[in-house]
Structures are given as C-alpha cells and as structure tokens.
C-alpha cells in the first residue's frame, strides 16, 4: 500500500486547480490581440457644417467616417479652426465645405492641405442667389460678399448637395456606388416630400413678409415666394444703425406683421427691441448653420427642424 499516495493526490489536485485558475486569469486579464476599430479603417470625410454632415451621413451610411468640424452650439460665422482641427482635416480623404464665402477660414486652409485630401466646394454644385443687402449696401470684410451662402434653406439645393455627395462617394469607393445611389434616393424622397409640404403650408397666407434680425433666410423666402426683410446683412456680428431699426419698426407696424424672427445661436437683442417697439412677438427660427447640443440629443434633423420652421412661419403669417 502506498502511504504517500494521499499526499500525491492532494498535490496533483492542487496543481490542477492552480493550472485552471492560471489559465482563466490569463484569458481574463492578459492583453488581447489588438483589433483595429472598423471606423478607423474607413475613409474620413471632414465636413464644415451640420447640413453637409447630415447629407453625408444619409448617403454614406456606415461606410465612411464623417466628421463635422464646427463644434455644436457655436456661431458658425465666428468659427476659426485650431491646429488640431487642421490636423484632423489633413487626415481626410475628402474635405467638403459650404463655400460661397460662408467659411472665411476654408479658402486659405485648402491650399495648405496634403495632396491626398480632395477638397470640394459644395457651393459649386448648387444654385446661388444674391443677397439684397450684399448687393445694395457696403459691408466690411466680415461679410460674405454678394452671393448668399445659406443655400441649404432652399430644399432643391439640399437635394443637389445629396446628389453631389453620392457622386463623390462613388468615386471614392466605386464598389459602394449602388449603396450610395440607393441611400441618396431614399433621402431625396424625404426632401421632396418636405418641399411639397412647404408649398402647401405657405400657399395661402394673410401676410407673406418674413422679418428677421439676420439675413440668413433669403433662400427660404425666395423658394416659397415670401418677402424677405432682415435688419442686418449676411454677417451675424454686424451692428444695425438706429435708422435701419427705426425703418423696420415702421414697416412692421404698417404691414401688421405679427412676429419678428431671430436665431437661437446669436444675440436676439435687435429682434427683441423691434418686437417691443412695434408690438409684435419674437420667435426663434433655425437657419441650420449649426445645431445645439440639445437639438442633437433630441435627434433633431434637417427635416424635423425645417418642419418646425414651417409651423412657426405658418402661424406667424396666418397661413391656411
């Protein structure tokens, strides 16, 4: 009889338990094999504004890494890229900006980017209109010039932007061209319905004059046959003269305008002053130059924001 067998059995049992524990510990806590995240393997598309971001995401789906440059909640007119912004844009396959003078920083930047970055000025793919203030009045170098750069508020231009995205992404990844075409078609169908709803909603209105503190709604007014009156020009940091404010107050009283519109992301002091002096109300209208953190968290889109704008316009102009 082996007197040492019980001790050997205990030792073997101990070694077995230790081995199992070690193996479990190893797999639980040892460094895993490095797996590159899918997103980092995707071509990067850097875009300057929210509307470009939304159109790009709608067309690309999950096949491209779309990065928005201008921070949420900031005044897009006042934005200036930091060195880290420039570094990120330099890693992109495509850099798409609005153009028509909207981003004053983009023109000098594009000439300094690596040749591997394809630069796209989206304003060359849409139909531009002239700003009445830009063509009639003198503005300093903060203004955008005579072309109004807020072209995405004409839904037809949003459709053209989507088509341009489809074309560029198909060139970037030809094998995905059928997917990009299908995605663009779905998004354009939504935009066409939105355009139809605007035409219906603003067809018969008691008052067709749109008064805003900033000349950002020219395309919306032009596409829907509204008279566009703005207190300041295309640049949101412009200061109106006392004479201009007085003239707008007189106009509001004369035409019985019920609402003065302002933008949430810039000061509403001028609009509130005119509303107070004329007896009108004051409401925000979203020009979609940018959106806030709250709007993003509540899953607001170009379509939902434009529909909210339509509701406010219809109420203010007493449409039926």
Image (spheres, rainbow, N blue to C red):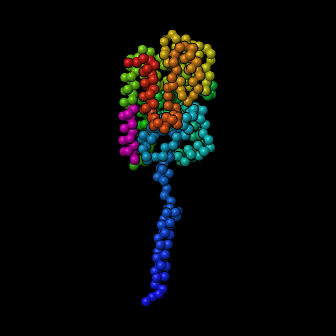
In which quarter of the view is residue 180 placed?
top left
Residue placed most toward the observer, 28 or 157: 28
Give percent across and percent down for residue 253: 52, 11
Q: Residue at x 49, y 37 (%)?
A: 296
Q: Let me know if residue 312 appears in the view.
A: yes
Extent of the magenta region: 176-191
Q: Residue at x 61, y 24 (%)?
A: 238
Give percent across and percent down for residue 32: 50, 62
Q: Residue at x 59, y 13 (%)?
A: 246
- Give the prevailing secondary structure in the magenta stretch: helix
Q: Let me know if residue 107 appears in the view.
A: no
Give percent across and percent down for residue 202: 40, 21
Please state, as top left, top right, bottom left or bottom right, where the C terminus lies in the image. top left
Vertical order, 267 against 161 (above or below): above
Q: Is residue 179 left or right of residue 277?
A: left
Please state, as top left, top right, bottom left or bottom right, where the N terminus lies in the image. bottom left
Residue placed most toward the observer, 28 or 246: 28
Number of labelled discs?
A: 0
Vertical order, 150 against 318 (above or below): below
Residue placed most toward the observer, 169 or 37: 37
Q: Residue at x 59, y 16 (%)?
A: 245
Give percent across and percent down for residue 227: 47, 18
């Amino acid at each position: 009889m082996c007197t040492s067998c019980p001790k050997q059995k205990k030792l073997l049992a101990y070694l077995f338990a230790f081995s199992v524990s070690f193996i479990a510990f190893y797999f639980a806590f040892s460094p895993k094999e490095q797996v590159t995240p899918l997103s980092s393997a995707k071509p990067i598309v850097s875009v300057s504004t929210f509307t470009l971001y939304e159109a790009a995401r709608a067309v690309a789906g999950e096949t491209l890494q779309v990065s928005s440059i201008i921070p949420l909640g900031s005044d897009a007119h006042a934005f200036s890229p930091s060195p880290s912004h420039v570094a990120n844009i330099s890693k992109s396959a495509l850099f798409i900006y609005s153009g028509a003078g909207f981003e004053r920083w983009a023109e000098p930047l594009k000439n300094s980017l690596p040749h591997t970055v394809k630069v796209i000025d989206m304003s060359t793919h849409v139909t531009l209109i002239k700003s009445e203030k830009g063509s009639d009045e003198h503005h300093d170098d903060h203004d955008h010039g005579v072309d109004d750069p807020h072209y995405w508020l004409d839904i037809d231009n949003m459709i053209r932007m989507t088509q341009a995205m489809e074309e560029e992404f198909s060139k970037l990844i030809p094998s995905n061209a059928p997917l990009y075409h299908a995605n663009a078609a779905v998004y354009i169908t939504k935009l066409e319905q939105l355009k139809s709803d605007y035409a219906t909603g603003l067809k018969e209105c008691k008052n067709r004059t749109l008064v805003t503190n900033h000349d950002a709604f020219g395309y919306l007014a032009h596409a829907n046959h509204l008279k566009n009156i703005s207190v300041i020009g295309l640049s949101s940091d412009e200061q109106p003269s006392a004479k201009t404010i007085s003239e707008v107050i007189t106009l509001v009283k004369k035409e019985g305008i019920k609402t003065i519109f302002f933008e949430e992301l810039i000061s509403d002091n001028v609009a509130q002053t005119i509303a107070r002096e004329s007896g009108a109300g004051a409401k925000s209208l979203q020009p979609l130059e940018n959106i806030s953190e709250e709007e993003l968290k509540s899953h607001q889109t170009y379509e939902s924001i434009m529909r909210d704008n339509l509701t406010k316009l219809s109420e203010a102009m007493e449409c039926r």
